[in-house]
Amino acid sequence: MAGSKKQETSSNLPGTNLQQRLNATVPHNMPLYLASVWQCESTEQADRLLAGELDGYVYQRDRHPNADLFAEACQQLHQAERAAITSSGMAAISLAVLSQLQSGDHLLVSNQLYGRTTLLLTSELQRLGIEHSLIDPYDLQSVRSAVTPQTRMIVVETIANPLLRIVDIKGLAEIAQAADALLLVDNTFATPAICKPLTLGADLVMESVSKFMNGHGDVMLGMLAGREEHWARVDMVNAAWGFASSPLECWLACRGVSTLTLRMRQASATALAVAELLNARDDIESVEYPGLPHHPDFELASKQFQSGFGHMVTFELAGGREAADQLIASQEIPFCPSLGDVGTTLSHPVSTSHRGLSAEQRLALGITDGTIRLSVGVEPTEDVLESLKKTYFQFCIER
């Protein structure tokens, strides 16, 4: 009798196959699809799929379910009409410029960007015949003056890396629109939990999902979002230039963004406490945080941001490189040349993110050998403050 009952279970019924069982119910969480290619029923179906006449999957580099699901999440977070997922943040900004610009075009580039972004936009694109001008994005009149008849794009960061200046997105969007150009905003430091640039007039927004948007230090992804009218070439360029994302990375990122708002709320609250602690010390040269009233963009950030002022704090040590090395050597707070993890980390822009700039260029931006960039995590606020006090106390003794 036991044997006959076993034969009646669905997994052993004649004619029942795996696909039928999978279709019987829907998984609560999206499965991980590691397939690199999908089987087609006929040459006609393959032709229609590849021509975009049928909605489906053929080859992972062109499209896969995990990227589609994460793209939908990004569309909702940014209130965007379209979104594309790329293999990294640099791939996302490359996708933006390669899909929208051509030889002979001109773009305005913020003088405060991530170092590799600056390298891409000022050196690499020039080889393709795309010219640029560096601008001070915090002086709207100077931005207007830099526009030429060939200007087709303005590129800025919501919160600048690493000195945390804030751009006036609405003001820049008006300048871009008047010039028949696009405004591309790198929103990595803010994430959509703090700021949604598309709702403020930006045409395109990109994120290095590897940072706080995913937030767990275990993916390498990028994202580009925007309006339908700017999407004619995006998907083709994403596939043709090999910017494709990994299913596993997308699956992990879907997990990450589900807690984005909670993580950013905690990290922002702690970052403000950290900034206030550092700002109270006479032996710190300067503290940069948009939530401090003395920050030059405090009022703009208060209007433009939705919830908090972000998880990044930058400060300058007296004593230059030697002081920075001594602080890092304490190892109480990990020294990591990235940001946005659940755990608090610190970085040294001169030796990491902005090493590609000359000493003169860094100094002109206010980045010194003593500049430290702190990425605040989601630990209890008192734990982060205690680690910082312990780190700095040890540093002061050693000095």
Image: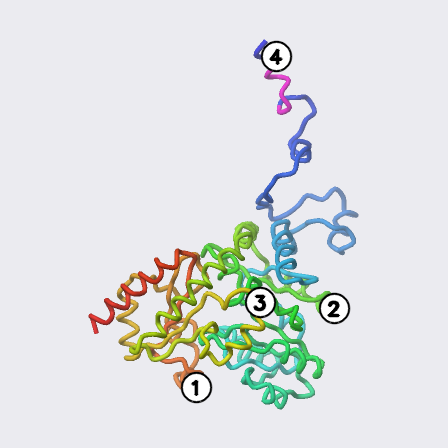
Quadrant position of the N terminus in the picture = top right
* Residue 398 - label: none
Tell me which secondary structure the magenta stretch mostly adopts: helix
Question: Element at badge 3?
Answer: loop
* Chain-order first, disc 3 or disc 1: 3
* Residue 195 - label: 3
Q: Which residues are magenta?
A: 4-11
> Does the residue at mark 1 contact the one at mark 4 (Cβ under 8 Å)?
no
Q: Amino acid at mark 2?
A: Glu
The magenta stretch spans residue 8: yes
Q: Is residue 14 above or below residue 301?
A: above
Question: Element at badge 4?
Answer: helix
**Image point 37% across, 79% down: which residue?**
286
125 or 21, nearer to the observer: 21
* Chain-order first, disc 1 or disc 4: 4
Q: Amino acid at mark 1?
A: Ala
| Residue annotated with mark 2 | 229
Q: Amino acid at mark 4?
A: Ser
Query: How many residues crowd mark 1 within 10 Å: few (<14), some (14–19), many (20+)?
Result: few
> Does the residue at mark 4 contact the one at mark 3 (Cβ under 8 Å)?
no
Q: Position of residue 156 (x, y in %)?
A: 57, 76
Distance in Å between CA atoms under marks 2 and 4: 62 Å
* Residue 364 - label: 1
Question: Element at badge 2?
Answer: helix
> Does the residue at mark 3 contact the one at mark 1 (Cβ under 8 Å)?
no
| Residue annotated with mark 4 | 4
